[in-house]
Image (spheres, grey):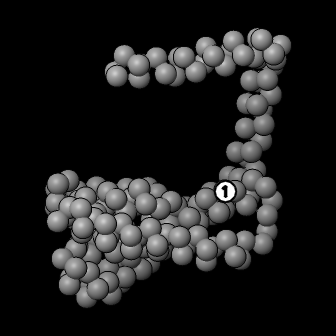
Amino acid sequence: MSAVSRFIVPGVIVITLLVARWKRVPVYESFVEGAADGVKLVIQIFPYILAMYVAVGVFEAAGALAFLSRALRPLFSPLALPVEIGMLMLIRPVSGGAAYGVVSRVLAAYGPDSLAGKTASVLQGSSDTTFYVISLYSGAVGARKTGYAVPLCLFGDAVGFVAGVVLSRLFFR
């Protein structure tokens, strides 16, 4: 299997080049055109990404995370889960980097084979950075009305989190 995995990416590139040659697609020119479009897209969505990073920084600097941590403690104690799991649920829709930091703290404190470590890992993979994705995609296509997208995506995150906690307790207990 490792021999196959070493050749997957080069194989896809070779197949792409062969198909492009067969269909008479100018590969280099198409690549340069796509790269130019990518640079335009980065410039277009950069303000949205910057706004999200600033908002997360202000949220953390204001002490809101510490306050939420204290508020969540009574909810997670009966489940025998550390409050960091609740913090992960709150921060994951906002910041992927901060969520990775929470997961790494849980893994360092409780170990990767603990219920907390496994639950944190499942929760990290059961959702996405909702606000980042919405701002990125709406900025890329110029959508201004994202009123329904935010609550629906947050509902999807909540379903993923609840399912992740329940399934982790069922499978890893």
Tell me the residue that label 1 is attached to: 136
- Give coordinates of residue 107: x percent, y percent: 22, 56
Q: Is mark 1 on a helix, strand or loop?
A: helix
Of 149 and 47, the residue lying toward us: 149
Question: In the visual, does 152 lie left or right of 70?
Answer: right
Q: Which quarter of the figure has residue 22?
A: top right
Q: Residue at x 61, y 14 (%)?
A: 14
Question: In the visual, does 30 lie left or right of 172?
Answer: right
Q: Residue at x 65, y 63 (%)?
A: 134
- Three-letter amino acid code of the residue under disc 1: Leu
Judged from this view, the residue extending furthest toward the front is 170
Q: Which residue is drawn at 49% across and 69% down?
A: 157
Q: Residue at x 59, y 66 (%)?
A: 131
- Give coordinates of residue 138: x percent, y percent: 73, 61
Of 87 and 13, the residue lying toward us: 13
As displayed, is residue 60 above or below residue 29? below
